[in-house]
Image: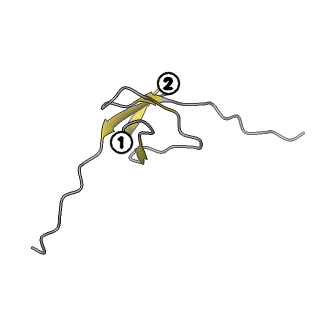
Amino acid sequence: MSFQPVTIPISGSCPVCCADISPAGSVEESEVLSCPECQSLLVVEGFEGCSLVLREGPSVEEDWGE
């Protein structure tokens, strides 16, 4: 008897534009995702059941060589 892993779809909402975020594969805490609607960088803060808890990622600042 062989067991097949069960994949439970997870999703969340973009905190910037409220678009639905449904990653294709597995997702880990602190992983960076991109919103398909507004292209904001999002960080996975954690999980609430089958829902992703997302926050807006830090903006990329310019390096002035300091």
Q: Callout 2, which amino acid?
A: Gly
Q: Residue furthest bottom?
A: 65
Numbered circle sitting on residue 57: none
Numbered circle sitting on residue 49: 2
State the SS at label 1: strand
Tell us which disc is closer to us: 1 or 2: 1
Please name whichever residue, 1 or 64, is drawn nearer the observer in this view of the structure: 64
Please name whichever residue, 56 or 36, is drawn nearer the observer in this view of the structure: 36
Residue drawn 70% across the image and 34% down it: 6
Q: How is the image coloured?
A: secondary structure
Q: Callout 1, which amino acid?
A: Leu
Q: Quadrant of residue 8?
A: top right
Q: Residues within 10 Å of mark 1 (few under 14, many from 20)?
A: many
Residue drawn 47% across the image and 45% down it: 28
Q: Residue furthest front?
A: 37
Please name whichever residue, 17 or 50, is drawn nearer the observer in this view of the structure: 17
- Image quadrant holding the N terminus, namely top right
5 on left or right of 14: right
21 on left or right of 24: left
Residue drawn 9% across the image and 73% down it: 66
Image position, residue 41 (x, y; %) = 34, 45
Numbered circle sitting on residue 42: 1
Residue drawn 66% across the image and 35% down it: 7
State the SS at label 2: loop
Image position, residue 43 (x, y; %) = 36, 43
44 shown above or below 50: below
